[in-house]
Image: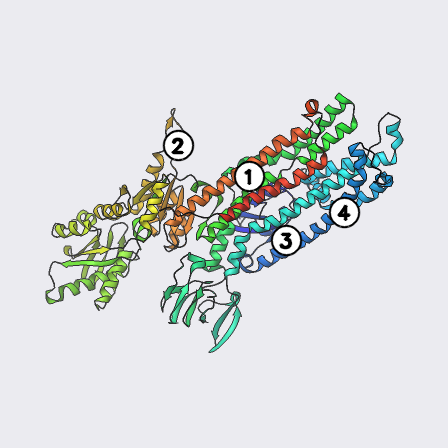
Amino acid sequence: MDTITLKLRGMSCASCANSIEEAISSLPGVSECNVNFGAEEATVKYNPQQATIKKIQDAVLSAGYSATFLQKQEMIIGEDDEYKAVRKAESRDLMRKVMVGGVISAILIFGSLPMMTGLELPFIPVWLHNPWLQLILTAPVQFWCGYRFYTGAWKAFKHHGATMDTLIVLGTSAAFFYSLFVTVFPDFFINQGLKPEVYYETAAVVITLIMLGKLFENRAKGQTREAIHKLIGLQARDARVIRNGREVDVPIQEVELDEIILVRPGEKIPVDGEVIEGSSTIDEAMVTGESVPVKKQPGDEVIGATINKTGIFKFKAIRVGSDTVLAQIVQLVRQAQGSKAPIQRLADQITGWFVPVVIAIAISTFVIWFNLMGNISLALITTLGVLIIACPCALGLATPTSVMVGTGKGAENGILIKSAESLEAASKIKTIVLDKTGTLTEGKPTVINFVTVGGTANQNELKLIKLAASLERNSEHPLGEAVVRYAKFQGVELTDARDFEAIVGSGIQGYIASRFVQIGTKRWLSEIGINTDLFQEQKDAWESLGQTVIWIAVDGEIEGLMGIADTLKPTSTQAVKVMHQLGLEVVMLTGDNRPTAETIADEVGIDRVFAEVRPDQKAGVIESLQSEGIRKKGKNKSSQSNVKIVAMVGDGINDAPALAQADVGMAIGTGTDVAIAASDITLVSGDLRSIITAIKLSQATINNIRQNLFFAFIYNILGIPIAAGIIFPIFGWLLNPIIAGGAMAFSSVSVVTNALRLRNFKLKNER
């Protein structure tokens, strides 16, 4: 399956988004389609064997809208400026129409004050209320300012649908053309004993107010994408590349793999690479969130968009274009902002049938009031009020705007949330499962103790180190790296291994010259028949100090024992403490031996430990924790509200199955690509306090969505009956269509404004 992002044009409300979604989803080969009304983008998963980009674009076009395919490079570099230009042009057009509509509406309202108030106002010229003058003034507002509503309604009608534009056109056109009939044929009403009243000002003011609301909404929606703009703005524009022995400045999109790039103090690093000459300190705060500059020397990786502080160095480009870390972060944020949270399903279902229901209510309102009262003006005002006040936009904007701002805020804090579904799940976490090595600890273990059967005589110790390190350098495990570093520190030269094999969760084995070497856990070596009684006392002593013990066997006999320790991250203890304060259950899950695991757990304050767990067993442990929260109801039913939402935090390849099994998988950004790919949330900095930030941000975002949905629902639940005249028999009061238009215009603005409050989210560090 391929995934593409389309930039959409022509949407006016959430019903438009639903129409596009249905059009794309109906295509053969399309497995998933999410249309984000707030971002004006569609994310489509499809089978390229059955569906093509051209077919998807044609489906959008046939629905009455346009779609532009965004290349990865465009999303990272070029689209930002294009987006701003389109947004500015739209704002300018709206501003012109609002100004024209505002001036004309003010004149019409002023001229209609005697009719609206029932008072004689001598300072208002009678000719201002002349219906022919009002017709001339209203026509440009109705058909020029309101042109976008007519085109939108016509598109919906052609495709057998109805949108917000349909409601606006029906309401304002009813007022305009009724007034036109009164203007041309006033005697028709006079002969029936009716007063020939016109409602031009209603049509003009309603359109103007809705245009004003669209203007504010347009500007506010632009602010919801602020995080993307900031991320894109982080990158350098040019790179100083060494070509043919000369320094050449080129745009970063022209940098190729393996090219050599020179960076001077104070400059941004243009792309990801590996230092090959020189050294410096790098400010990586904009990517990792770490405020302390990091020392870099030959062999170390550097990240694009970070800032070179002190030295001059050269590096080789290893990731360019859409493959850089920053580009991947931008892509993840875009992906998250284009996704839908489960909480949005109800809103989507409602907007699907909202407009037809409103039209039915409006028709019923007209029929009922005209039959009951015989007053066409009363029936008309109530019908117009219902059509105009009903606004599905607020429902459509409630979720996506909050998700866009929330995920963007997460990216600013070094928390990359892959989807809105992950965001919602994170707000409900009850249990946090932490891996030990690389998660609670630094992930840079060091050999602390080493003992051999033969002692130090005849360089027995160095010979065993050579065998062990020569085998371990073929392993990706952090403990193996510790053994290799120890050997290099001792000045031992390593040799090649033959028939190397890694036994997942147990150890490694292979031949060094003619010697068969096996390194791993006591459990594994015992299972294959090797006697491990020799160093039991040393093993127990070292494990009590929090060291991980590995056994070294040569030709089927135990020859040595190593004690390896990994220091805790400075923030691990504080992070676990805050998690407990939040009422979360904290669990350690590790493949390390139990004594070592329990020592580390005691140090950070974790009560529940699963130790000596193989990688293939970790997912099963997560599943058992998830099932602990289920309370059986009847024979085959359970209460969903009592399901324990479990988060797994890890960094290694061995954590990937558990990350995938967990309700929320959180990968440490300093870990492996496999772990990051299997996770729902990536913690770029590796600081465990980011877990707390992620949880609190997700809770704040979901609460914000609930507020938006509440306001949107309440607005329509209360507004439509009032507009229909439900309180008229009691208080004799009708909702003026002009007031209805103002309320409708600002309902969506209020939702977007509420979502923007998330930009002020700040984490208070509990201690």
Q: What percent of the width, then of the height, locates residue 544?
A: 19, 49
Label whose residue precedes the other's in the sequence (2 or 4): 4
Give how far apart the Cα atoms at labels 4 and 3 are. 24 Å
Q: Image point 42% across, 67% down: which residue?
A: 309
Cα–Cα span, label 2 and label 4: 59 Å
Three-letter code, disc 2: Asn
Dot in front, 4 or 3: 4
Q: Which mark is residue 87?
A: 3
Q: How many labels, in total?
A: 4
Q: Amino acid at mark 1?
A: Asn
Q: Are marks 2 and 3 in contact (CB under 8 Å)?
A: no
Q: Which is nearer the N-term, disc 4 or disc 3?
A: 3
Q: Is residue 28 above or below residue 478?
A: above
Q: Which residue is mark 2?
A: 642
Q: Position of residue 71 (x, y in %)?
A: 55, 57
Query: Of callouts 1 and 4, which one flags the residue occurring earlier in the amino acid sequence?
Result: 4
Q: Nearer the viewer, residue 472 or 116?
A: 116
Residue topped by disc 4: 103
Judged by depth in the image, the label closer to the viewer, 2 or 4, is 4
Give above or below for 117 relative to 573. above
Q: Earlier in the sequence, mark 2 or mark 3?
A: 3
Q: Secondary structure at mark 2?
A: helix
**Image mark for residue 462:** none
Badge 3, how many Cα within 10 Å: few under 14, some, many 20+? Answer: some
Looking at the rendered structure, the secondary structure element under dot 1 is: helix
- Residue 448's image quarter? bottom left
Image depth: mark 1 or mark 2 in front: 1
Alpha carbon distance from label 3 to label 1 = 24 Å
Q: Of the residues shown, which amino acid type is indicated by label 3?
A: Arg
